[in-house]
Amino acid sequence: TEKMFDELEAVMKSVGWKGTNETRMLWNTDFKNRKIISEFIKDPLLGKKRLVSMPDRVSNTVNTANSDAVYRPTVVNCYPGELNSLDSWWKQWIGFIFKNEIEVKKSGIDKKIKMYEMFQTIKKSKYPSITAEEEAISIPLQTMCLAIFDAILVHMMNDIDAKNWQKIRSDICLKLNHQKNDRTVDILATTY
């Protein structure tokens, strides 16, 4: 929504990112007018440019210095919090990306960082579909695209089955992720 973009723009400016004005222009002239499925989720250029997958790669599930995992508030991981509404999700998302500190190992040293500090420039030399102009603003641009992606998924899941989707996801995460090592040991112990 416009209100969410205004808040995103303000927090991106507050951390000193360059390219926020250009990102606002792309929001106004392109992204806010797109249909969510046919023109955003299914847009092959977003994939080729890595505008969602690059920030997702570093923020989806992060292993902390003490080997715990922290999860971005999104549908596509094992985030344990409630994502019952866009407003609730948005507060959690902004907090995770820009406000909360996590402790990670960098070159063998424990370091406290905020998630946005892990985002990297998307280089045209590696991803030729991205334009030079987009490369120059790729950090705020990919952050906006990640926010749009996550917002679409939260909206869709709450629209489809607000009552049950989070329980189903939680059960899947429990069985496939959180108990994976125990289940593997059990299989090995009883099968071999």
Image: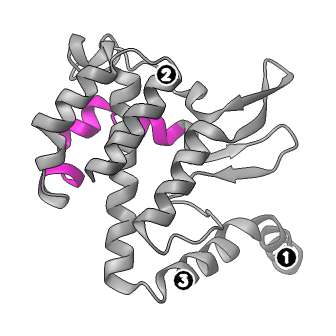
* Residue at the (12%, 38%) spot, across then down: 30
Is 56 colored magenta in this rendering?
yes
Residue tagged by mark 3?
Answer: 168
Rendered location of residue 192, percent (x, y): 84, 73
Rendered location of residue 95, percent (x, y): 59, 47
Counting residues from the start of the chain, the first of labels 2 and 3 encountered is 2
129 versus 100 height, above or below: above
Relative to the observer, which residue lies in front, 92 or 106? 92
As shown in the figure, which amino acid type bears the numbered disc 1? Asp
Rendered location of residue 39, percent (x, y): 13, 51
* Residue at the (73%, 43%) spot, across then down: 63
Q: Is residue 108 visible?
A: yes
Residue tagged by mark 1?
Answer: 186
Q: Secondary structure at mark 3?
A: helix
* Residue at the (46%, 36%) spot, across then down: 55
Whole-Å distance between the Cαs marked 1 and 2?
40 Å
